[in-house]
Image (cartoon, grey):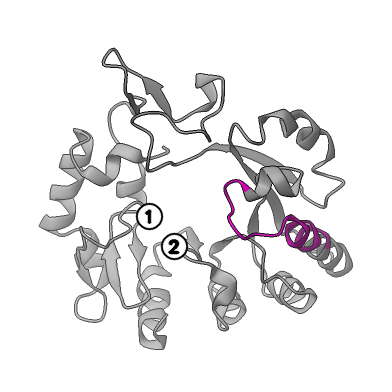
Amino acid sequence: MLPEVWERVLHEAGPYAHTMQFYFQGEPLLNKNLTQMVSEAHAIGLYTIVSTNAQAMTEETAEALIRAGLSRIIVSMDGLSQESYGAYRIGGDIQRCQDALRRLREAKDRLHSHTLIELQCLRLRTNEHEWNALKACYKDLGADRLTFKTAQLYDYENGNPLMPTDARNARYEKGADGHYHRKPLGRGCLRVWSGCVVTTTGEVLPCCYDKASSHTYGNILHTPLYELFTSQKANAFRRAALRGKPEICKNCGK
């Protein structure tokens, strides 16, 4: 993130925000300034979250994040074997995830920290046979909490080999036309009223599902965040979200 963008975010969001999430469509551990940013957000009383694939987690990084006062860290590990994990995390190494959990736990215990270590697992057909075993061992791996999440898939209309066998654990269901559709989301969306995304270059987006920055409210370097968040453009998007109209809403997990 550009330093001037971070300064604006911290200064303008700090007095109003409760939580700051340090991730958006990328791997936050690749940001060499991450621990400093977490420390600065923690210093003004913000609840801080990092979500990582943990492939770049070293002992030094684990300790630095804990020392920075990080409130919660999510480690994505979709399974208990390399075969099940690698079906979705192409090129990933499950041992690195397990090493990261251990390193975080050791740093947390050594520093008497309250950082919440969360192991997150996507519900996939390739790992569903391991769910019960994961429930039984996640604390032994170093996590405080285990969370299961439905997987977002892009090629799902004709089915997908990663979809769980039990439709209750999938984000999609088969319709009368024989194709799969996103399950009904219901009315409304808390996310676009309670927060926003600021990209590394300062674009302010409605939520993390705007992966292509196609619904930007404007840039924080040109307009104060408060004005962008309460702008006509932002409110127009929210009205559309109530009706589930924006394309980005159609594959949402909330």
Q: Quadrant of residue 55?
A: bottom right
According to the image, label 1 marks what residue? 208
Amino acid carrying mark 2 in the image: Phe
Magenta highlight on residue 125 = no
Instruction: Residue at 83% x, 68% y: name it.
Output: 107
Q: Given the current orientation, which residue lies at the most extreme bottom position?
A: 3
Using the rendered image of the protein, determine whether residue 43 is visible from the camera's viewpoint: no
Indicate the secondary structure of the residue bearing disc 1. Answer: loop
According to the image, label 2 marks what residue? 24
Instruction: Residue at 77% x, 79% y: name it.
Output: 60
- 1 is higher (above) or lower (below) than 253: below
Point out the stretch of residues depicted in magenta. 87-102
Quadrant where the N terminus sits is bottom left
Amino acid carrying mark 1 in the image: Cys
Quadrant where the C terminus sits is top left
Q: Residues within 10 Å of mark 1 (few under 14, many from 20)?
A: some
Give percent across and percent down for residue 27.
53, 67
Residue 88 falls left or right of residue 140? left
- Marks 2 and 1 sit apart, C-alpha to C-alpha, by 6 Å
Give percent across and percent down for residue 57.
70, 70
Instruction: Residue at 83% x, 34% y: name it.
Output: 136
Give percent across and percent down for residue 32.
58, 83
- Mark 2 vs 1: CB contact within 8 A: yes
Indicate the secondary structure of the residue bearing disc 2. Answer: loop
Using the rendered image of the protein, determine whether residue 91 is visible from the camera's viewpoint: yes
Q: Residues within 10 Å of mark 2 (few under 14, many from 20)?
A: some
Q: Quadrant of residue 116?
A: bottom right
Closest to the observer: 50 or 113?
A: 50
Magenta highlight on residue 90 = yes
Residue 211 falls left or right of residue 18? left
